Image: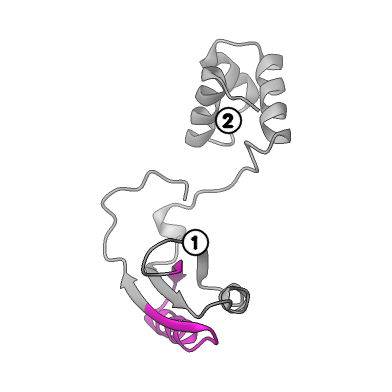
Amino acid sequence: MQTDETDLALLALLGENARAPVATLARRLGLARTTVQARLDRLESSGTIQGYSVRLGQAARAPLHATVLVSIEPRSAPTVLSRLKSLPEVRRVHTTSGRFDLIVTLEATTTESLDETLDRIGEAKGVRSSESLIHLSTKLDRGGH
């Protein structure tokens, strides 16, 4: 599906407030409400919009964040991913190119929980090595992922 400038403007408005009523979106875009609803339906059915979510404020987020760079043994990705999925502090896992195979994002409520999760990742079958980066302060956050 080809997205045009109007679709991009609609997506930008939804990025600001995914709960905005269709009538408000239509007014801001200068379009009829039915036109905006039809575009939303098309963007959803094509997979461009895969869902709507809540973006938590700082007070509701886990206070500790870390990124773990993980090198894995050849052909061990399914085993390692299964282990990572079982750890509730693991929020995201990305494959990557370069020296590391996976980038893992963690969120934890206590240093003990974070430490235990890092240990469980490091000792997981198939993990060759890992390097942890504890997030100290956020200098820019544009939301999303």
Quadrant position of residue 71: bottom left
User: Of the residues under marks 2 and 1, which one precedes in the sequence?
Assistant: 2
Q: Quadrant of the N terminus?
A: top right
* Residue on which the image places disc 1: 94
Callout 1 environment at 10 Å: few (<14), some (14 to 19), or many (20+)?
Answer: few
| Residue located beneath label 2 in the image | 20
Q: Secondary structure at mark 2?
A: loop
Please tell me whether mark 2 or mark 1 is closer to you in this view: 1
Residue 119, how many percent across, how many down?
44, 87
Instruction: Name the residue at 29% across, 56% down.
Output: 138
In-image side of 38 versus 104 (left or right): right
Taking the magenta stretch, the answer to whether it contains residue 106 is yes
Secondary structure category for the residue under label 1:
strand
Q: Where is 1 relative to 56, above or below?
A: above
Q: Amino acid at mark 2?
A: Ala
Q: Which residues are magenta?
A: 101-130
Badge 2 crowding class, 10 Å Cα cut-off, few under 14, some 14 to 19, many 20 or more, is few
Give above or below for 68 relative to 47. Answer: below
Q: In the depicted view, which residue is nearer to us: 61 or 84?
A: 84
Residue drawn 69% across the image and 34% down it? 44
